[in-house]
Amino acid sequence: MNWDSFLFYKKSNNQIKMSKISYLTQEGLDNLKNELKHLTTVERPKISEQIAEARDKGDLSENAEYDAAKEAQGLLELKISKLQETVRMSRLIDESKIDSSTVQILNKVKIKNRKTNAVMEYTLVSESEANLKARKLSIETPIAKGLLGKKVGDVAYIKVPSGLMEFVILDISL
């Protein structure tokens, strides 16, 4: 199965907007929903309260607190909107159908840099679940894209900003 992201186009106000499908694990989707709930139930009321307090201080045209609170509100609403779109366009991955004969999303991949002999292990995940500290690499990165579809023993030649890198696939697991 090819896990490339699909793009959907929708027309609104004579503009075309692209929406990208994100393939997520149940854990990843739950994390997004929890973050969205926190932003709408905790952060949004906090900012509304800050705006009300700033408004009570008088002249809004020269009120820096009011301007800052309104700007923070705009940024929060943008973040909420993006998260809602990501949740709406998310599709759950059936982990039981993941194959480890070739590199795919949700595979744990052990690779060796042929130049430095450094061995690294990453789990390939969707962009919203990526976390380098947890060794979770987004499938949108050049390295992950270069690894997709490869088998154990294959060499992946990957063009990165610093040049061409060569990785040997040592192991693929779930």
Image (cartoon, rainbow, N blue to C red):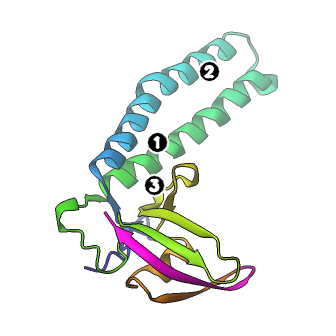
Would you place residue 168 above or below residue 13 in this image?
A: below
Would you place residue 67 above or below residue 48 in this image?
A: below
Kind of residue at disc 1: Ile
* Residue 42 as seen in the image, left or right of residue 21: right
Q: Quick one: SS at disc 2? A: helix
23 in the magenta segment? no
Q: Residue 22 versus residue 162: which sits nearer the camera?
A: 162
Instruction: Name the disc covering residue 128, or none.
Output: 3
Kind of residue at disc 2: Ile
Q: Residues within 10 Å of mark 2 (few under 14, many from 20)?
A: some
Residue located beneath label 2 in the image: 51
Q: Is residue 94 in view?
A: no
Q: Report the residue at 32% width, 41% height from top.
A: 30
**Which residues lie in the magenta part?**
161-174
Residue located beneath label 1 in the image: 80
162 in the magenta segment? yes
Query: First in sequence: mark 3 or mark 2?
Result: 2
